[in-house]
Image (spheres, rainbow, N blue to C red):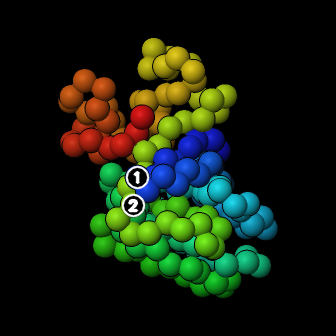
Amino acid sequence: MIDAVLEGSDGLTLRVRVAVSPWERVRGLLGRAPPPGTGLLLPRATSIHTFGMGFPIEVCWLDDELRVVEVRTLRPGRLALPRRGARHVLECPVGTGIRPGERFALQQARGSRSSPGPEREAGGASRVEGARVLGYTQGAAPGAVGPRGRGHAPIV
């Protein structure tokens, strides 16, 4: 897991864990309800389930630019299918207040698991490594990060 911060265009800030390994992705939030102000980000995932969970969660589908496509509350024992335009899924506590259209910026948290390298910025943030977590590569514009080199993803 990689610790990160999602900053929303509406002022909402969430501490998230980014599930990167196959085991982390399969386990998800099983057995542990997320505390308020936190979430689990599943990069390059568009459908999830709540089988084996004892609590409902809020599911937010995000597009390439981390803009919220749709938000649904998912009760235990349910399957949520892909949504048009979604590339990532954010799982968080019910009542978080995320709305469709909100756009997030992702920043890797200080001290999070990552390898040091030339992309590391002062203060521990990592622009390119955070992008790689979501399956992005460095864009053509200086400092820009976008899906497969096209456009700009809001990863700071």
In the picture, the disc for residue 49 is none
- Mark 1, residue position: 9
Percent across and percent down for residue 128 are 42, 30
* Residue type highlighted by circle 1: Ser
User: In this orientation, does residue 28 appear?
Assistant: yes
Q: Please give the name of the residue rendered at 77% of the width and 79% of the height, measured from the top-left corner.
A: 54
- Mark 2, residue position: 102
Where's the C terminus, which quadrant?
Answer: top left
Q: Secondary structure at mark 2?
A: loop
Q: Please give the name of the residue rendered at 68% of the width and 83% of the height, measured from the top-left corner.
A: 76
Q: Quadrant of residue 101?
A: bottom left
Percent across and percent down for residue 152 are 27, 41
Query: Callout 2: 10 Å neighbours few (<14), some, many (20+)?
Result: some
Q: Please give the name of the residue rendered at 59% of the width and 52% of the height, measured from the top-left corner.
A: 14
76 left or right of 84 in image: right
Q: Secondary structure at mark 1?
A: loop
Percent across and percent down for residue 3 are 63, 41
Label 1 vs label 2: CA separation? 6 Å
CB under 8 Å between discs 1 and 2? yes
**Where 132 falls versus 117 (above or below)?**
below
Q: Nearer the viewer, residue 106 or 132?
A: 106
**Where 53 falls versus 120 (above or below)?**
below
Q: Nearer the viewer, residue 146 or 23?
A: 146
148 left or right of 115 in image: left
64 left or right of 31 in image: left
Query: Callout 1: 10 Å neighbours few (<14), some, many (20+)?
Result: few
Q: Quadrant of residue 77?
A: bottom right
Q: Please give the name of the residue rendered at 54% of the width and 68% of the height, measured from the top-left corner.
A: 97
Q: Nearer the viewer, residue 58 or 10?
A: 10
* Residue type highlighted by circle 2: Glu
Q: Considering only order in the chain, which callout, 2 or 1, is on the residue closer to the N terminus?
A: 1
